[in-house]
Image (cartoon, rainbow, N blue to C red):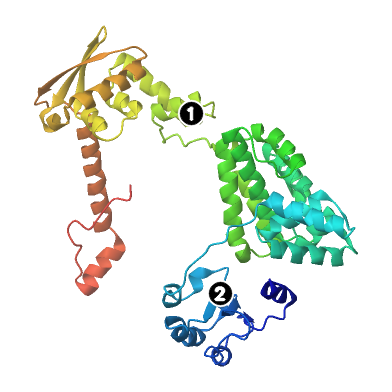
Amino acid sequence: CGACRDIDAGRFVDLLEVDAASRTKVDDTRELLDNVQYAPARGRCKVYLIDEVHMLSTHSFNALLKTLEEPPPHVKFLLATTDPQKLPVTVLSRCLQFHLRRLPLPLIQERLASIAAAEKVEFEPAALRAIARSAEGSMRDALSLFDQVLAFGGGRALESEVRSLLGTLDRRHVETMLNALASGDGSALMACVAQLDERAPDYDQALGELAAAIQRMSLLQALGALPTEDEEQDAALATLAPRFSPEDLQLYYQVAIMARRDLDFAPDARGGFEMALLRMLAFRPETAARPLTPSTTVPASAVAKAAAAGGATPAGAAVAVRVASTADATDGNWPATVAALGLQGPASQLAAHCVLVGRKDDVVQLRLDAAGEHFRRPQLEQKLAEALSSHYGTPVRLSIAVTATEEPTPARQLARAADDRQRAAEQAIESDANVRTLREVFSATVQPGSVKPLN
């Protein structure tokens, strides 16, 4: 129609386009609204298109709100924004909201390719793909970036020039860093960073590219296939993905996105980027295991799980397992057995209130302290029997008798140890020189029950 042709040519007088980013003052808004009362000259309605409306000041919104509450029948307002959460609730409540979806990356890339072909522009598909990805679903932003790339590259759109302009990471650098991470090669990783630094990259973008590659590898491991974005990079990631465990990829992804948040606090951007990569290396499970001190023991169940998973077993843990298993075989050390079972919740309390009487064939005889009788429930007994069967390596049944016993159950041993720690903490406070000084100078007293042991 004629109105559409006039709008396309920019001469339709009843369409008023306003850039709110450059007209944020209340006087600008009032001047704009002075003509609301007049009827349209040519069309059925007078349309006010306010772009980036979230940039208006609070007073401008208040001036606009009065018109929005009682708009004339011949006036329509189109408020466009990328941040609707910044608009006042009073304005949002008087509008119909339409959330425009993002355009798919292949569609933007295809449109850019058709424009480049029509304009006889030399381009590389990888360059258009990088532009489409940076546009984040906006065709307008993609066209603006395309114009900048052509001006920067002398009428050509090459991948190297696009990445130089946008400050993004070349996929070969991403693959090199992932290879070094998979191999645990810190020297190769730092050499890659040195090469990358020569191009003066945007390290925030570099971390984003690295996180995106890690995310695609995680999806590849979980789903077995990916929607194709970059065939060459996807092929490289498919080769790299089996070299990482799913846990490693989750950790690396978290490190990368947290490093982006903390990059502003680093002494320099390169240092923050390097520390993120070194953190990924430092948190690898192979290097995280440390020999435990001789006084430290590890529950046998935890060591058994680590061994079953193929992980490294700390030296101190092996000693703890040997001692526990020997005690079980010779002395019937029930507290050590309970610790090795790894039970949680009420089932662990049932075991802790029992004393081992003996084991005959497939029957384990236990004596339950009367104080723990309320833990004797069929489901808890079943959990305890299953844990003991796994511990002994053969199915066992339980025979539990409830009696008042003076024998030291694991629960009593823990309570006694807690009492000992509490007394030791109170004695340490009483003998502290600073506490004695406070008593003498200020007549201070230690409140009963306020002293707690550190562990």
Residue at image position (58%, 39%) is: 248
Residue at image position (54%, 26%) is: 310
Q: Quadrant of residue 345?
A: top left
Q: Residue furthest left?
A: 404
Q: Nearer the viewer, residue 174 or 397?
A: 174
Disc 1 marks a residue whose amino acid type is Ala
Q: Where is residue 168 shown, x and y percent of the image? A: 74, 57
Task: Give the side of residue 359 with respect to residue 290, left or right.
Answer: left
Q: Where is residue 421 shown, x and y percent of the image? A: 26, 45
Q: Which numbered dot is residue 306?
A: 1
Q: Earlier in the sequence, mark 1 or mark 2?
A: 2
Mark 2 highlights which residue? 78
* Residues packed near mark 1 inside 10 Å, few (<14), some (14 to 19) or many (20 plus): some
Residue at image position (42%, 21%) is: 322
Q: Which numbered dot is residue 381?
A: none
Q: Residue furthest top?
A: 361
